Image: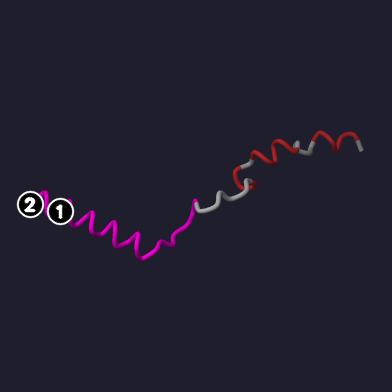
């Protein structure tokens, strides 16, 4: 039984493994609102107009 103990990882090792971390809310959000899109679009339009 004791030999098996050495082959197991600790709780800290498991929790610090990238695949076992809890997802950060909103980090991988690909959705955005129409308002956000319109705002970015108008900002880009203004930037493009200023460059010409």
* Residue 30: % across, % down: 44, 60
To which residue does mark 1 refer? 48
* Residue 23: % across, % down: 58, 50
Q: Residues within 10 Å of mark 1 (few under 14, many from 20)?
A: few
Quadrant of res 7: top right
Q: Of all residues shown, which one is farthest toward the left?
A: 52
Residue 48 covered by magenta stretch = yes
Q: Quick one: SS at disc 2?
A: loop
Q: Residues within 10 Å of mark 2 (few under 14, many from 20)?
A: few
Give left or right: position of 29 versus 2. Answer: left
Quadrant of res 14: top right
In front: 4, or 51? 51
Residue 46 covered by magenta stretch = yes
Quarter of the figure that contains the N terminus: top right
Between marks 2 and 1, how big is the CA–CA gap?
7 Å
Q: Quick one: SS at disc 1?
A: helix
Main SS of the magenta part reads: helix
The label number, if any, that marks residue 52 in the structure image: 2
* Residue 25: % across, % down: 55, 52
Could you tell me which residue is drawn at 12 percent across and 54 percent down?
49
- Magenta segment, which residues? 27-52
The answer to whether the residue labelled 2 contacts the one labelled 1, judged by CB atoms less than 8 Å apart, is yes
């Amino acid at each position: 039984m004791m030999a098996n103990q050495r082959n197991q990882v600790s709780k800290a090792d498991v929790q610090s493994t990238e695949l076992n971390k809890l997802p950060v809310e909103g980090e991988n959000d690909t959705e955005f609102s129409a308002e956000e899109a319109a705002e970015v679009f108008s900002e880009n339009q203004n930037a493009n107009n200023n460059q010409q």
